[in-house]
Image: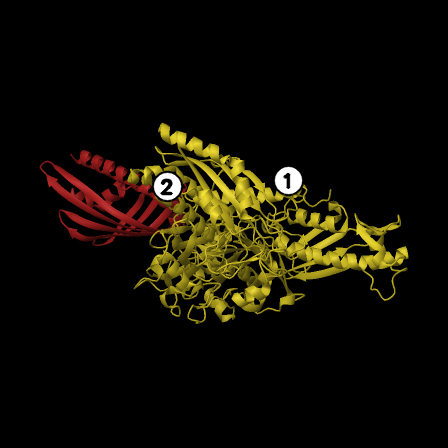
Chain colours: A red, B yellow
Amino acid sequence: MWDLLNDPEVLARITPGVDTLEQTGSGQYQAVLHIKMGPINSTFNGALQVVDSKEPESYRLLIDVDGKIGQIAAEGHVRLAENHETTTVEVEGGSQLTGRLASMGQRLLSGVARMFTNQFFKALEREVAIRN
Amino acid sequence: MGVIGQSIKRVEDQRFITGKGRYTDDIALPNSTFAALVRSPHAHAAINNVDTTAAAAADGVVAVFTGADLEAAGVGGLPCGWQVDFKSGDTMKEPAHPVLAATKVRHVGDPVAIVLAESREQAADAAELVVVDYEVLDAVVAATQATAEGAPQLFDDVPNNTPFDWELGDQAATDAALASAAHVTTLEYDNQRLIPNAIEPRCAIGDYDGARDHYTLYTSSQNPHVIRLLMTAFVLGLPEHKVRVVSPDVGGGFGSKIFHYAEEVLVTWCSRQIGRPVKWTASRSEAFLTDAHGRDHHTRVDLGLDADGNFVGLRVKTVANLGAYLSTFAPCVPTYLYGTLLQGLYTTPAVHVDVTGVFTNTTPVDALRGAGRPEATYVLERTVEQAALETGRDPAQLRSQNFIPAFDGVEQEGYQTQVALQYDSGNYGAALEKALAAIGYDELRAEQAQARAAGNGRHIGIGFSTYIEACGIAPSAVVGALGARAGLFESAGVRVQPTGKVTVFTGSHSHGQGHETTFAQVVADGLGVGIEDVDIIHGDTESVPFGMGTYGSRSLAVGGTAIVKSMDKIKEKGAKIAAHLLEAAEEDLEFAEGSWTVKGTDQSIAFGEVALAAYVPHNFPEGLEPGLEFTSFYDPANFTFPFGAHIAVVEVDAETGVVAVRRYVAVDDVGNIVNPMIVEGQVHGGITHGIGQALFEEAVYDDSGQLISGSYMDYVLPRADDLPSFETDHTVTPCPHNPLGVKGAGETGTIGSPPAIVNAVLDALWPLGVRDLAMPLTPQKVWQAIQQAS
C-alpha cells in the first residue's frame, strides 16, 4: 500500500483532477490539475511535495497550485495502519484558497473536496483490486 | 389642486422600462480601449516585483501601467473628505491610499496594475499574464482584533491600526446615571458588514482631447462635481476647468457611488498617456470586492431605566471597521452620522458614545444607505425592546413614555439633544399611535397570547422600531466645524426659455430617486407651468453650475430648496416685467397659476408672455437686464429630521428556524410630500433593504482575509417572496426651516426596519428562552438559538 501511494503514475491515475504528475526530485512533483464542478472549471499548475515521510506509516502532502481563478494551498496528512489482512488509509487535511476561487467557490469547494476524497478512495480500491 | 402632493408617474421611467436608459457602459466612444485591473488575490502582502513583460506583449494590448509608473508620474493618492481627530486632540492618521498599490496590498481586490487593450476580453486575458511577486503577510479581519496585541499592522505610521477615536456626550453623567439605575439592559453585538449591490456595476470612461487639452470622465457616480474636485485638486493636479465629469443615468448606488474610486483616476490618466479613450466596467465579482462596503460595527450598549421605566442613561461603545483605507466619507459615518443620533426619540438625560475607527485587511467601508443612522437606530431600538422584554413592559408603552413631547420648531423650539444636534420638529407619539392602529395592536397581542396558550407551535412575534434620522445633509458651517472638507450646500440654475419652457440645472444627481419628476413638480407648482414644460438636467459638470451630489436624503430638502430660491428670483424679476407690460405697480400684482394679475381686476399677463418679453425686450422696464434665468446656492440652516414608527409581525418556524415576515407597517414622517408614489417607492425599497440586513445579507471574510461571500451564491439579497405586502402611511410634521417643509425620504426604510424585524423574532422566541440573536437571522442561527435555549 505504501508503494502504491508513493508511485507517481498510480497517484496521477487515482487522484481526481490530476492530468499529469511528473517527479522532479525526491518527494517533489510537478502537477497539472483540472477541476470541474459547477461554476468552477479551471486548470491549475503547481508543485506537490511529500514531506515528513515515515515509511510505512505516514507522510504529509503539500499542494501549492496556481490557476486563472485563484490559488490553492493545501496540506494532507496521510496515515496508514496495518491491521491483519487490511490496511486502513486515513487522509486528513485543509486548504487555503485565494482569488475568485475563494470568493465564489469556498462553499462549493468543501463539496468538491468530499467528492474528490470519495473518488480517490474508490480509485485506490480499484488499484488494489487489480493488483490482487 | 396643485401638482405638489400628486402621485405623478415618473417621467424617467419611460426610458428605463423600455431599455432606453443611457448608462455609462452604453457610451461607446470611437477608437476606445478597454481596461482590466490586476488585483491582489491576497488580503495583506508586500509587493516584491510586478512583471508586465508578457502582458505588454499579449494580443491587442496597448499599454500596461503599474503603481511605480503612477508614482513616477507624480499621481497622488485618493483623498479622504473628512477629518475626525483623536479624542486627545491629535490629528487623524491619514495614510496614503495609492491609486495602484506599489509596495504593499492591503485587501483582496486592491489594484496593482492596469492593462489597456483593444477589447475587454484581450485586456482581461492580458491582466492574467501580469506576474506579481507577493510576499504574503498575516492579515487582520475583524474590527475587534485590529487593536489586539501583536495584530498585523496595515500602515507603519498608524499605530494600533487606529486612525482616529472619538466621543460625544457627558461620560461622567452617563456613568453616574447607569450606576444608580434600577435596571440596566446590556447588549453586545456586531452590526454586520453589508455589500451595496447596485444593479449597475461601476463604470468609468476617460477621454482626453489633445486638441483642446481637455479631459472628459464619464462615471457611474452619485456626485460628479465632487469627483471632479477631488480628482483634479488632490490626485491628478489637473486644472479643474479643463476637466468635465459626466454621470449619465446611474443604476443605483445606495451610497457606494458617492466616493472617489481609483478607476476614475486611472481611466482619466491613462487616456492622456495613450491619447485614446479608456473604458472600464466592473464585473460583478469586482463590485463585490471593490465597491465600498457598509456597516461593520462591534458595539456594546448599556441602557439604564429607573423603577418607573424612564430612561436615565445610555452608554455606547463601538469599534468601527473601516477596511483597508479611508474611503471618501468613511470617518464621518461611524461618528457624526452615528453618535449624534443616539438620543433617538427619547428624553434620556445622559448619553455618551465612544467610537474607535480601525483599519483591517478588508474592502474599505463607507456610507451605505442610511450611513451611521441604521447603526444608531439598531443600538437604540434593539436595546429599548430588550429592556421592555427584560422588565416585562409593553414595548410600545415603554417607548411612548420616554418620547420627546411634540414640538413644531416654530411655536416651540427645536429639541436640543445630549449629542450635539437640535431636532427641527417632531411628533413621535402621533406616528406610533397611527402605526398601532394600523396593525391592530391589541388584537395582535391577543392572537399571540392565544397561540402561546394553545402551544400549537405558532411562534408569533411583534417588533417595534421608532427611529429618527438626520437628513438634508448638511449645513456647511456645522459640518465644516466637525471635519468635513467640503461644503454640503446645493445649487440650482433655473432657465426660463423665451417660449416659457423651463430648464433646471441641479447639482443633486438622480440614480433612481425620480428627481426628473419630483423637481419638475416643484417647478410646475412654483411657476404655474406644466410638468411637461420642465426639463431637469443633472449629472454633468459642464452644464450644471456646481453640485454636492445625492446622498443622505438631501436632494429635495437641499437641492429642491435651491430650485425654489431660483424660482423666487425669477418671479421677482418676472413681476417687474409684468408690471411694466400691465402698466401697473409691482405691489398691486399677484402671481398665481402661471399669471400675474392686477389685484381685484381681470387684467393679467401669462408667465409665457413675460418670458418672451424677457428675451425680446423691446418694451421693457428701464435698467432691467434682459433674460430670465437665475442660479442659487442654498446652504441649509440645519439638518432635517424625518422619523417614524415601524411595526413588524413575524412568525418563526421553530422546527426549521425560518422567519416569515407576516406584516410590516411603516408610518413615516418625512415632512411635506411632493410625490407620494415616489416616497412610497423609496420606503418600500428601504424596508426591503433593511429586511435584507435583518434576515439575509452578510459579507463574510475568512481568517486570511478572503471574501467568501463574494457572489450571489453566498451573498443573499431579499426577494419578493421573502416579503409581505408593506402597509405604509404617513404623518406630516413639516420641516420648519426649508420653504418646501420637506425632510427627505430615501433612507427611512433602511434605518427603521432591521431592529423591528429582529425585535419581532426575539419577541416570538422570548418564551422559549432565546435572549439575543445577531443579524442576519438565518434559519440555521435561529434554529441553533432555539436548541440552545431549550
Q: Residue furthest front?
A: B308
Q: Vertically, is B117 above or below B649? A: below
Q: Are marks 2 and 1 on the same chain?
A: no
Give the class, few, some or many, for how many residues have Cα within 10 Å of label 2's Cα (few <14, many ≥20).
few
In percent of width and height, residue B141 lies at 36, 56
In percent of width and height, residue B223 lies at 59, 57
Q: Nearer the viewer, mark 2 or mark 1?
A: 1
Q: Do tag 2 and tag 1 residues touch (Cβ < 8 Å)?
A: no
In percent of width and height, residue B195 lies at 46, 50
**Circle 1 sits in a helix, a strand or a loop, which is it?**
loop
Residue B357 can be seen in this image: no
Residue A49 can be seen in this image: yes
- Using the image as rendered, state which of residue A44 and residue B717 is in the foreground: B717
Residue B186 as seen in the image, left or right of residue B727: left
In percent of width and height, residue A131 lies at 17, 36
**Circle 2 sits in a helix, a strand or a loop, which is it?**
strand
Give the class, few, some or many, for how many residues have Cα within 10 Å of label 1's Cα (few <14, many ≥20).
few
The residue that label 2 is drawn on is A36
- Using the image as rendered, state which of residue B337 and residue B156 is in the foreground: B337
> Which chain is disc 2 placed on?
A
- Using the image as rendered, state which of residue B528 and residue B760 is in the foreground: B760
- Quadrant where the image shows the N terminus of chain A: top left
Q: Residue furthest left?
A: A84
- Using the image as rendered, state which of residue B666 and residue A94 is in the foreground: B666
Residue B604 as seen in the image, left or right of residue B681: right
Please, what is the three-letter code of the amino acid marked with disc 2? Lys
Per the rendering, the mark at residue B18 is 1
Cα separation between marks 2 and 1: 39 Å
